[in-house]
Amino acid sequence: MDKAHTQEAATQFIGERRGAPRFFLLSRVDVSIPGCDDTYWGGLANISQTGVALSIRQRLKPNTKVTLRLRFQSDDGREVTETLSAKVIWHCGDSAGLKFETPLTAGSPAAQHTPYLLAHVLKKEQSTCR
């Protein structure tokens, strides 16, 4: 299989695994592992209703439950910090994929603690549907 076909197959495979569209949000992310005194930090690569992709140098083991503290600037310029529980799904190099404990949807437990993140995701979803 040549390089173009390999890339196309990989794109199709990845696309099939994603249950929700991903959106960019510039944010620092602190990652805490229960029972561990260390807090690791990384950058948010993308976010969806179901999870995030991070740029992080610390190796995160798949199936590890973590707490994510996201720091970003809201539309009105204020600094906002919101916290979510997630599970590490994959880690490769300096990238990791995490799935939220509960999806970031209106009325979900996650959304109650993260109104600014939910608003960002919903706003991006609406703008892509137009």
Image: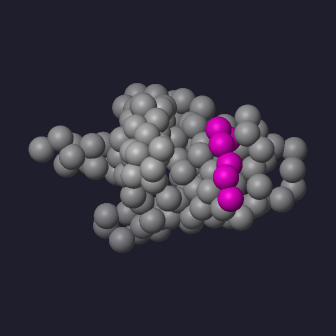
Percent from the top left, x then y, of residue 118?
A: 39, 44
Front residue (pair 87, 116): 87
Q: Is residue 76 left or right of residue 36?
A: left
Find the residue positioned furthest to the left: 130
Q: How many marks?
A: 0
Q: Residue at x 60, y 32 (%)?
A: 101
| 115 lies above or below 44 | above
**Split into 4 quadrants, where in the image is the C terminus?**
top left
96 part of magenta stretch: no
With 76 as the anchor, is 50 left or right in this view? right
- Asked if residue 55 is positioned above or below residue 62 in the image, the reply reads below
* Residue at screen point 58% across, 37% down: 99
Specify the farthest residue to the front: 1
Q: Nearer the viewer, residue 51 or 1?
A: 1
**As rendered, which of 72 and 52 lies closer to the eye?**
52
Asked whether residue 7 is in view, the answer is: no
Q: Residue at x 54, y 30 (%)?
A: 102
Residue 73 screen position, x and y as percent: 42, 67
Residue name at image x 75 percent, y 50 percent: 60
Applied colour scheme: one colour
Percent of width and height locating residue 88: 67, 41
- Main SS of the magenta part reads strand
Q: Position of residue 45 (x, y in %)?
A: 50, 59
Query: Which residues lie in the magenta part?
Result: 88-93
Whether residue 61 can be seen here: yes
